[in-house]
Image (cartoon, coloured by chain):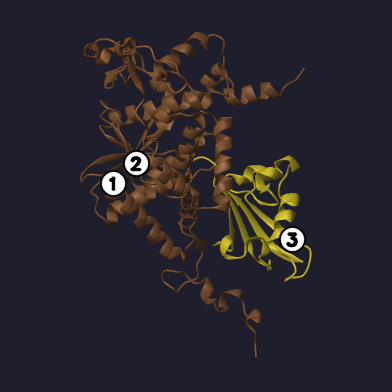
Chain colours: A brown, B yellow
Amino acid sequence: MSSSADLPRKDRKIKPSALCELCHGRKAVMKRPKNLQKLCKECFFLVFETEIHNTITSAKLFQKGEKVAIGASGGKDSTVLASILKTLNERYEYGLELVLLSIDEGIKGYRDDSLATVKRNQQQYEMELEIVSYKELYDWLMDEIVSCAGIRSSCTYCGVLRRQALDRGAAKLGIHHVVTGHNADDMAETVLMNILRGDTARLENSCSILTQSSGSPIKRSKPFKYSYQKEIVLYAHYKKLDYFSTECTYAPEAFRGTARELLKGLGAIRPSCIMDIIYSGEHFVLAQKKKVTKSYKNGRDKKAATAEDEQEINPDGSVALKTTKRDGNTCEKCGYITSNKICKACVLLAGLEASRAKASVDGSEEGAAKLGKTLELLSF
Amino acid sequence: MIKVKVEFLGGLDVVSNGVREHKVTLEGEEGQVTMKDLIDHVAKTVICDARDIPVFIQDDTVRAGILVLINDTDWELEGMEDYVVESGDVFTFTSTLHGG
C-alpha cells in the first residue's frame, strides 16, 4: 500500500474542497476578494473578462466603429487593460479601433524605462502608439518642475499636466474617448480621500464610470472600475503579460500614501470593503447648498429678489464672492477647456516660469530628482 | 534541510538589490517547517537592508498589498502562514502597490 505522501506532488489526488467552485474539475488557484469564491485559472480568466464585458455593456461605454485611446503607462493596470480590451473587442465584436496613448512626463530612470514596455506592448497587441511629452507641450520636464517646485507638490503638478496631455494627445489623433486603467482599489481610495478632505464637490462624481467636462469633446472612462487590483495583478501574472513595475521616483504625497495603507489594511480584514466604499460613493447625493437672498434678510419686497441677489453659504459659514465661473469656457492663454479665465495648467506653469531661473539642471545625468534627493541627504 | 525558490516581483525586488529570484535553504526536516518560518527566514536573509523589512512584513505577517503565491496558487487557499513547506516549493511575492 502506498500512501499519497510517497507519490510525487502532482500525482496526488486533489481534495474536493480544493477544486474550482465553478467547473468542479480543476484545482482552484485563487480566491476572489470580491466574493471569496475559489477558482481555477481558466475559470478566473473567463469570469474576470466577462465581468469587464458586462461593465462595458451595461454602462454603454463604446459605440461600434469608435476609435478609442488607451492611456498606457506600461504599468500593470494599463497593460492588462490593453490586453483585455483587445480580447473583448475580438470576442464580442465591439468594432473598436484601439490605440495606445502614452505620456512622457520626463522622469529619468522611471518613464523612459516604462515607455520601453509600452513600445513592446505596441508590438504584442498590434496597436498604433502615440507618445506625447510634457517637454513638447509645456517645455518642461517633470524633473525640472520638481527641482523648481520641490518634491512635495510633484503629484499636483503631474496630475494636472497629465490630464491635459491625455486630452491633447487624443485630440491630435482625432479621438474622442480615452480609457484608463483605474481599478476598484483606486476608486475606493479616491472616495476615501475626498471624504477625509471634505471635498464634497468631487465626492459626488468620483465614482462615475464615464466623465466628460461640458464643452470638451473628449470623454474618459474606467472599464476596470469594479476590478480588484489583486485580480489585475493575478491576471497579468497568469497570462505572463509584459509590464513595468517600478515606483515613480517621486513617491505619492504622504496623505494619499497613508489613505492607501489604511485601505489595504481594511481590505485584508474585510475584502468586500473596496466594493462597499465604491457603492457608498455611487449613492452619495449632496443636499442643496443653503441659499439666502438679501431682500429676504431685510424682510421686505420678497418678490424683487432675483437669482443674482442669492448668496451661497459654505459649510463653514463663509460666503463665496461672485465670480464668472462657467462651463464650456476656454483658457485665454492656451485655449484648453476650463471653468476659469486661465486653465489650471497655465496657472501652475506661470508660477514655475517665475522660478525657472533658479534651477539649472542641464547636464545632470541622473535627472534633477535624483540630484535633489542626493542634496537633501547631504548634511554639513 | 529544505531547498525552495523565492521570487520577489512587481517592484518588490528593490529590497533585494534588484534580484528577483532567490534560492533559499531552510534548516529543519520536511513537515516541521511552516510558511511562518519561511517568511521570517526570508526577511532575515533575502532583504539586504534590515531597515527595509517593514516593506515586506507588517504586524508579524506579509504586508497587506503583497500578493503571495505558493507554487503559483494563492496562499489563501494553502493555509497562509500555517502551510507546511516542502522541498522544491516556489514562493512568489508580488507587490500590488506600485504604479498602475
| Residue at numbered disc 2 | A209
Left or right: A118 in relation to A68: right
Between A12 and B58, the one lying in front of the other is B58
Q: Are marks 3 and 2 in contact (CB under 8 Å)?
A: no
In this rendered view, identify the residue nearer to me: B66 or A174. Answer: B66
The quarter of the image holding the C terminus of chain A is top right
- The residue depicted at 58 percent of the width and 25 percent of the height is A369
Give the alpha-carbon distance from disc 1 to disc 2, as whole Å: 8 Å
Q: Are marks 1 and 3 on the same chain?
A: no
| Quarter residue A370 falls in | top right
Which dot, 3 or 2, sits closer to the camera? 2
Q: Is residue A84 above or below residue B32?
A: above
Q: From what the image shows, is residue A304 above or below residue A284?
A: above
Q: Secondary structure at mark 2?
A: loop
Name the amino acid, label 1: Ala
| Numbered circle sitting on residue A59 | 1
Q: Position of residue A299 (x, y in %)?
A: 31, 11
Visible residue check, residue B10: no
Q: Are marks 1 and 2 in contact (CB under 8 Å)?
A: yes
